[in-house]
Image (cartoon, rainbow, N blue to C red):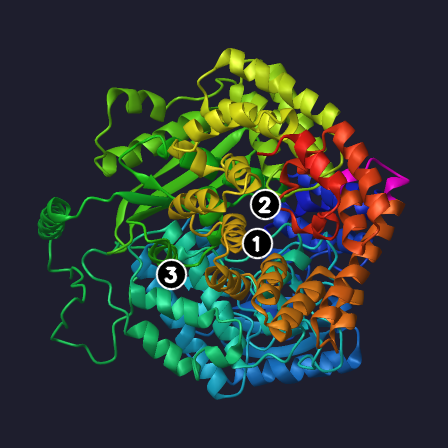
Amino acid sequence: MNRSDWERAKSLLADAADLPEADRERFVLERCPDPELRRELLDLLSTPAPLSSIVGGSALKPGDLLGPYKIQALLGIGGMGEVYRGRDSRLGRDVALKVISPRLVGDASLRHRFEREARAASALNHPSIVTVYDVGETDGISWIAMEWVEGRTLRQLLANGPLPIHEVGVIARQIADGLAAAHAKGIVHRDLKPDNVMMAADGRTKILDFGLARHSWAGSLGDAVADDETVAAPTAVASLEGTILGTVGYMSPEQASGRTADFRSDQFSLGVLTYEMLAGRRAFTRPTAVETLSAIIREHPVPLRLIRSGIPDALLDIIAHCLAKTPDERFASTRDLAAALASVEYGTGAETNVGRIQDPIPDTPDPTPTPGRILYPTPAMGRRTVVWLLAIGVALATAGWYRFGASRRAIESVAVLPFENTSKDPEAEYLGDGLTESLIAQMSRVSSLKVMARGTVFRFKGTADPQEAGRKLGVGAVVVGTVARRGSQLAISAELIEISTGIRLWGDKYDRPFVDLQRVQDLIASDIADRLQLPLSGQEKRTLLAHGTESPEAHELFLKGRFLMANVSEEGDLEAARLFQQALEKDPKYVDARVELASVYARSVGEGYAPPAEGWRRADEEIQKAAALDPANVLVRAARASRRFQFEWDWAGTEREFTDLSTDPRLLQGNQFHPIALYFWARGQPEESVALMERALRVDPGNVEVRIMMADFLAHAGRLEDAIGHYRAIAETESSNSRPLFGLAEVLKRRGDVKGAVDALRKAYELSGLEHGARLLSAARTEKDYENAQIAVARDQLGELQDLAKERYVSPLDFGRLYAQVGEREQAFTSLEVALAERSLGLVWLKVDRAWDRIRDDPRFTAIVRQVGIP
C-alpha cells in the first residue's frame, strides 16, 4: 500500500486495536470500502504480531541508509514489512529494498536460514526472475536488495478483469520458463501468486521472492484468516512433513495438507494463476481459509469452458494437468510444462490481444508460420491492413457459422444442469437449485422438447465436463450457468452447449436487481427456445413464460422452502412450512406455494412425525384453497387424489382420478406420480406400477428413488432376475445407499441363494449403521440365521422407537410393523387397531407389505384389510 493508504490503514488499525480480537475483522469489513486496502488490512490483522506494534511502527525516511543503499521512497507496507525504492550508491542503479519485519527474523536460526536461502536465490539468472542482488542487516533491520522493475503486479492487472487469452498464454509461458530455470537448480518458489508476479513495462513477466516466501508466517488458520493470506508454521525446517507453507488461495494440495512440496507444487500454483487470468476469479475461494484449503485438497474448480469460450483445448488440458490433485499426475518436469505452453496454437477464431503485453521476440525467428499460427501485425502493416484482415476473418467465421447452422440437426432434448452458486454465502445455494428447477419446469411446458427431470440432472451438480454429462444423459444440448447474489443485485450467466460438437449455441449474462429473477428466467427460457427454433404454439408461448406469482419476495421464500424440502428431516420440513406460509402472506394466490405447503403436511404423516388426522387436515386446507384458484392444475389434482387414496380409502374414486392423471407427462417431472404407482402396487397390480416407472425413467433416468421403486415393483411382480439386475446396478453406482441391498437380499432369499442374501443383508446393515445385525450375519450360513438377524435388528429398532415415543409422537403403525416382524402377535394387533382408528398412511399397503407376513394368516388381519377396503 502507498503512504496515503498506510496513513488511512494506521488510523483504522488504531481503532481496531481497542476492540476484542473477534470483532476486528468485522470492523474492518464495515469501515473500509476499498477492496484492495481492505484485503491488506485483513492480512495485517491476521499476523501474530501485536496490533499496537504494527500501528506504532515507523517507516524509514528518504535519505536513510541500509548498507550501501539510500532510501528514496516508500512503495508499500504489508504484514511482512515494507518495500522501498532505493539507490545503490556504489553502482548508481535503482533497487527494490524489502525490509523484513523483526517478528519474522527475531529468531537467530530463522534469520541465518533466511539469509542462506536468499543468497541461493540470488544465484538465479533468468529474464523471468527478479534478481536478488544482496541481503544484509543494518542496525537490527534485515533487508533484501532486488532488481528494480518498472511495471505493475499481476494482481493490479487482474483488478480490471480477465486478460485476453493470448496474453494469458504469454504470461503463463514466461512464468513457466522462470520456474523451470529455478527448479533446475533445486529452488522451489512455494508462494507463487499474483502479488509475486511483476508485469514489466517492456512486456516481460518477472517472478518475485524466489526462496523467500517460505518464511512468511501469518499464524494459525483461524476462520478470520483471509483466503489469500500467506501462511507458514515457524518450524526449524520449512519443508518438514506437517508444515503448512504458502498462500491459502494458491497453494497446492500437498501444501494444504502439510506434506512435503517439491517443484510440482509450483506447477499447481501456476495452474491456479492461469485459471484466474482466464476466468477473472480465483479457482478456489471459500468464506474461510480452512474451507479454501479443504476445497484445494478435495474439490475441482468450475470448468473454464463454463466461464469463458474461445480458450484453446490444448491450454485447457495444460491447466487441468497442472491442477491435478496428485503431484505424480502433473508434468514430469517444469521444462515440459513450459514446452507445452509454447506449443499452444491460438487459432484465428480465438480471442486475441492487441496490446498490454507482447510476446518477446524469439531468439531464432521462424520465417515460415505453421498452419493455424497467428500472424501478428508488424510495424510495416498499417492500421487499415489490420482492419481489413480482421474484417475478412469475421466474414469467413460468420459464413462458416451460417453453413454449420443451416446443416445442424434439430435438437429435440435438453438437460438444464444445476446452476453453480458463485456467491461466497453458502446459504445462497438455494438460488442455483431454484433457478435450475424453475427452468426445468418452464422448458417442460414445450411439448416438442424432451427435458430431463430434476432427479437426474442434479446428480451432475458440479460436473467438470458438461459435454460428457450431456452424453451420459443422451440429450442434444445442455444448459449450464452460474448465479450469484450480492445484496440486492443478481448476476446470472447461462450457456447452451450442443453435445455432439461442444459448440456454444447461445450464451448471455444478466446483471439485474434481485427482484428481476423471474424476468431473467423468462429471458433464458425464451432465448433457448428461439435458439433451438422450437415450434411453439400460441398457448405454449404463453405458458412458457407463465408464473405462479408476480411477487419477488414470495418467489424467493418459495425457492428457499423448496430447497429445504430436497432433504427429508422434520426440522427442515418445519422451516419449509414456515417459509411457504410467509410466501402466501405475500401472495395468497400463489398456487405453487400452497401445493408445496400441502406436501409438507402430507409428508409429516408419511414420515410419522405428525398424527394422520392433523397432518391430512392441514394438507387438505391448502389443497382446497389451491383447487379454488386453479382447479385444472395437475399438481393440485394429484395432491387431492393422493389424500383420497391414503386417508379417505376411496379406492373407486382414486382409480378414476389416477387413471386419468397417469397419462399426463407433467407429473413425471417431479414425484407426484409416486402415489399412483403405489396405488397399483397396493391393489396387487405391480405390472401397472412397472409400466409407470418405465415411463418416468425415460424422463428421469438417473433418479435413484424411481430406480429403487422400479426394482421393488419388479420383485413384487415376480420378475426376480430383472429385479436382481436393477438392484445390483443401483448398488454399484450408489455405493453408500443401503436400500438396493435390502431389496437384493430379499429377492436372493426368495430365489434360494442364501449365501448371496446373507452377504447383501450384512452389507446393508453395515451401511445403515446396524452393527448388531452385521455381527450376527458375519458367520451366518442358513436361512434361519438370516431370519434371526432380521428379528434381532427389529427388536433393537423397537427399543429405539419406544424411547422416542416418550418424547414425541410415533405412528402406531411403525410399532405394529416391528411387533409383527419379531413375532409378537398380540402387540402387533393392538397397534394395528390404534393405527386403524387414526387411519395411518401405511394401512393401504397391508396386502403387499412383507413386514406383516408373520401375522398374515390371522383372521384379525384379514378383517383389518377388509376395513381399509383394499380390493
Q: In the image, is residue 746 part of the stretch drawn in magenta?
A: no
For image coordinates 62% across by 26% down, the residue present is 597
Q: Name the residue under label 1.
A: 285
Q: Residue 424 carries which label?
A: 2
* Callout 1: SS: loop
In the image: residue 359, left or right of residue 797: left
The quadrant of the rendering that contains the C terminus is top right
Q: Give amino acid for label 1.
A: Thr
- Residue 562 vertical placement versus 632 (above, below): below
CA separation in Å, label 2 and label 1: 8 Å
Contact between marks 2 and 1 (CB within 8 A): the answer is yes
Q: Give amino acid for label 2.
A: Lys
Q: What is the magenta range?
A: 804-813
Q: Where is residue 622 in the image (x, y as percent from the top left)?
A: 61, 19
* 10 Å crowding of disc 3: few (<14), some (14-19), many (20+): few
Q: Residue 201 carries which label?
A: 3
First in sequence, mark 1 or 3: give its number. Answer: 3
Contact between marks 2 and 3 (CB within 8 A): the answer is no
Q: Which one is closest to the eye, mark 1 or mark 3?
A: 1
Q: Position of residue 797 (x, y in %)?
A: 81, 53
In the image: residue 185, left or right of residue 603: left
CA separation in Å, label 2 and label 3: 35 Å
To which quarter of the image does residue 333 belong? bottom left
